[in-house]
């Protein structure tokens, strides 16, 4: 092989042996395509949290566009394979869905280890590292790309926190509201936040922005799908949900419903 030909072929051979194809820009229309698939499946699985498909799609597209600027390494083939897997429209639970998914990632993030990141549940399993680069996890408590995070210290009432992070106050008695750790309300007390209640849920919050803290409901209990976190999750882990079709607390939440429930919760002080 001539030296000239070697320098031409070696880069191509390297690409052919790569585990991941060359990244592509996210094509126009991808947000609409994902929103259409997600919202149609949610409606068919009985977990549409919106008055119409258009309302659902508008929120999904808004969230898609808000996070897409922090993503890179888009792989069209993997994205297509996820949508074609049957996991969304078949209404299977998260464990069954993961058995159907392709073994790839449609997106990775752009933040390297030590940089801040944003937990992103909109894409579910097709975006395994949130807004971190491949191989690094976004630690949900601190919002930092870190594969070996320190055990977080418990916060105190009045400490600064981030509402974008799960349990950023790292206390079962505090929640983050307006960037400050605040004490949770007890059962029977008024609440204005989906995480406001101590071992309970805020009943009626979606109606006028204020509710009453109530104990979480057990499986089989009557429930209102508009009340988030109202069903007590199973001890073995997984999701509990208020099935809009039966208006009762159930287990085995469909994967597509879990994605919407995790991602599309209303803002803390307002309804959808």
Image (spheres, rainbow, N blue to C red):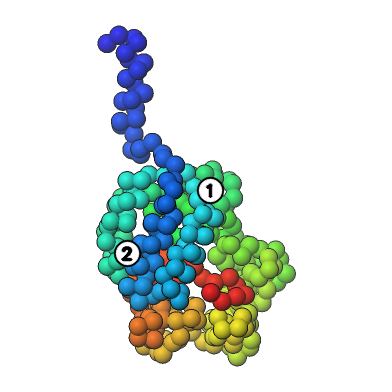
Q: Identify the residue shown where x is 35% and y is 39%.
A: 20
Crowd around label 2: few <14 · some 14–19 · many ≥20 (10 Å): many
Above or below: residue 231 compared with residue 161: below
Residue 39 location (% of width, % of height) = 39, 67
Residue 84 location (% of width, % of height) = 28, 56
Asked whether 227 or 180 is in front, the reply is 227
Asked whether 143 or 30 is in front, the reply is 30
The residue where tag 2 is placed is 88
Asked whether 256 or 164 is in front, the reply is 256
> Farthest top residue?
2
Residue 258 visible in image? no
Distance between the Cα atoms at labels 2 and 1?
Answer: 25 Å
Above or below: residue 15 compared with residue 256: above
The residue where tag 1 is placed is 69
Q: Identify the residue shown where x is 57% and y is 55%.
A: 143
Residue 190 location (% of width, % of height) = 64, 86
Q: Quadrant of residue 15?
A: top left
């Amino acid at each position: 092989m001539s030296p000239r030909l070697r320098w031409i072929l070696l880069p191509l051979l390297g690409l052919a042996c790569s585990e991941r194809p060359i990244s592509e820009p996210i094509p126009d229309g991808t947000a609409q395509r994902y929103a259409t698939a997600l919202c149609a499946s949610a409606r068919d699985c009985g977990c549409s949290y919106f008055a119409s498909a258009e309302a659902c799609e508008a929120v999904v597209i808004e969230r898609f566009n808000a996070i897409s600027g922090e993503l890179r390494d888009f792989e069209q083939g993997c994205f297509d394979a996820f949508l074609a897997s049957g996991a969304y429209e078949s209404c299977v639970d998260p464990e069954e869905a993961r058995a159907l998914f392709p073994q790839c990632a449609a997106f990775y993030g752009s933040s390297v280890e030590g940089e801040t990141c944003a937990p992103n549940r909109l894409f579910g399993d097709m975006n395994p590292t949130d807004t971190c680069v491949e191989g690094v996890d976004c630690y949900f408590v601190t919002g930092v790309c870190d594969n070996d995070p320190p055990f977080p210290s418990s916060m105190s009432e009045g400490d600064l926190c981030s509402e974008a992070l799960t349990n950023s106050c790292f206390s079962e008695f505090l929640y983050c509201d307006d960037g400050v750790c605040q004490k949770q309300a007890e059962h029977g007390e008024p609440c204005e936040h989906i995480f406001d209640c101590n071992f309970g849920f805020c009943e009626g919050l979606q109606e006028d922005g204020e509710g009453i803290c109530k104990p979480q409901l057990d499986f089989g209990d009557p429930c209102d799908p508009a009340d988030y976190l109202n069903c007590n999750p199973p001890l073995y882990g997984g999701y509990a949900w208020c099935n809009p079709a039966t208006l009762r607390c159930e287990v085995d939440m469909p994967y597509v419903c879990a994605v919407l429930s995790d991602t599309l919760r209303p803002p803390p002080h307002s309804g959808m």
